[in-house]
Image (spheres, rainbow, N blue to C red):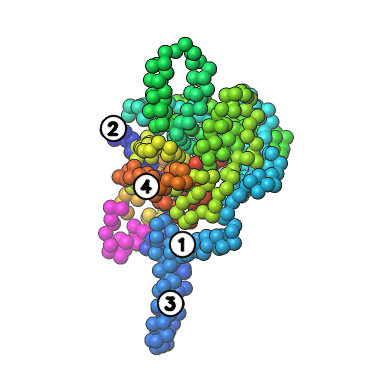
Amino acid sequence: MSQTVEGPRVYRGLNSKERAGWILGLTPWQALACLALAAPVLLAMSAGRWSSAFVWLLLDGTLAALVVVPIRGRSAMRWLADLLLFQLGVLMRWSLWQSRAAAGDPGPAQEPDLPGVLARLRFPDGPPHRQGRICLIHDTGQGRWGATARLTHNGVGMLSDADCERLAARLGTLLIALGHRDVVDRMSLYVRTVPDDGTEYDVWRAAHESSAAPHLARLATDELDRTIGSVSVRTELFVTISGSETVLAKPAKAAGGGTKGRAYVLYRVLDGIEDQLKALGVRTITWLTSAQLAEAIRTGYNPAAAAGLTAAHLAHPDPVGEDGLPMAAAGPTLAPTPAARAYHHDGFSSVSYAVMMPEAGTVFGSLGPLLAVRTAGERRTLALHYQVLSHKSAQRAVQRGRFRNNVMTDYKSSKGFTTTAVDARRAGGARAQESAVASGHAMVRVSAAASVTVPADWNLEDHAARLENDASGRFHLLRLELAQDSAFVSAAVPVGLGLPRLKGALS
């Protein structure tokens, strides 16, 4: 939901809960659990067994607190379960990762060797396309098919409010178009601000440097290279488009079935999406082959690997992009058991966060400060995951929201309670949301993740604190403890993982 005022458009409602509580903020299963825990206490009190009632009260009260009390986005019971599973993974060495190549037993070159949640992905090559054989991303866990493209864009940091407003409107048009295509429903945007290793410049300078250049000019150039090059950064931009297997199955069967049929169906959609991406200011769109996607994953885990890969491409150009890093070498070489608050991989350490949108709303481009690198050698990433709900799902969601707000408002009125400002805002938002969906607008689930990566011998907590400071006053960063490896994939690896399979919608 958005509201237009004088100045930039403010987007509100982005922090709405998918599963709002009905009874005193509790979900139905939490309310039933509390009733079940209260039953022994009430039965003991009705029978006059006060000592037993007191014992039951202590025991069930503790359990009720574990079920009800929220702690940093999760209930205490969920924290306890996650901690037990985390420690079990540590003790059983399930979370320790070493690639097969590093262990001396490399598999086939095209067989992916990836840790954690990436292990469920498959990367079959699609049939020939005008940009080569696009690598498809098959999520066997969620039953999804997608593809990733590398984009080039000038950024929005220097744009005026009017230009940002136009880009925001075009982004909304793109999301609406995704909802009307019936084949793809998810789009993930990844921005990685990484140190510029200077490989391309060194190769260019070696090829163009004059041997007759004055010695003083060489010294001045070398000094400029050391001064400017040490703080230079470059930005990588990726987009991943994906659709559900249940939706793709029927048109894929008509297109020949199997992987090729699904690829042909996706290709038709990707060609149409390119024009809408260019309307957002994207200059070039390159759909990644297996080798190119393997490099994007590899440099996500190991930013230092970019220098060698870039040098190899400059020395041996491959316009088609089919020669390069095999998928078996895409993942990290070594990833020790993840710590509760950080993730270590290939000599680097990362901290990842979920970006919680502010209650007061946000404006287009306000996430930019999260990508402001503060120290040479630091890398920051930001990912935005969108899922466009079908019109039928959106209608059900807004009807549930309106019904819930009406029931709670009527109940408070019948009991003599006054309606608070929060209740009025939620009711107004539900009505505006229903009106927007009825007029043909899309309802979108959205999540955002950010991470910071530094060499393993640096003080990681200092850089994490700087990222939190950059978000302070704009957003709330929720550190995804006990799940840092999965959070890192969501924030930095362009494969489209980042939204859970939940019913409902965020506006």
**Residue name at image x 34 percent, y 57 percent:** 409
Element under label 4?
A: helix
What is the spatial separation of the Cα atoms under label 4 and label 2, in whole angstroms? 36 Å
Above-or-below relation of 55 to 17:
below
Q: Nearer the viewer, mark 3 or mark 4?
A: 4
Q: Which badge, 1 or 4, is on the more N-terminal residue?
A: 1
Residue 59: numbered disc:
3
The magenta span reads: 407-422
**Residue name at image x 31 percent, y 33 percent:** 8
Residue 7: numbered disc:
2
Q: Amino acid at mark 2?
A: Gly
Element under label 1?
A: helix
* Location of residue 7 in the rendering, given as x and y in whole percent from the top left corner: 28, 32
Q: Which residue is mark 4?
A: 462
**Dot 4, how many residues are within 10 Å of its Cα: few (below 14), some (14-19), or many (20+)?**
few
**Residue name at image x 41 percent, y 72 percent:** 62
Q: Amino acid at mark 3?
A: Leu
User: Is 447 on the left-hand or right-hand side of 142?
Assistant: left
Q: Residue furthest top?
A: 212
Q: Which residue is mark 1?
A: 79
What is the spatial separation of the Cα atoms under label 1 and label 3, in whole angstroms? 19 Å
Asked if the residue at tag 3 contacts the one at tag 2, i.e. Cβ–Cβ closer than 8 Å, the answer is no
Q: Which badge, 4 or 2, is on the more N-terminal residue?
A: 2
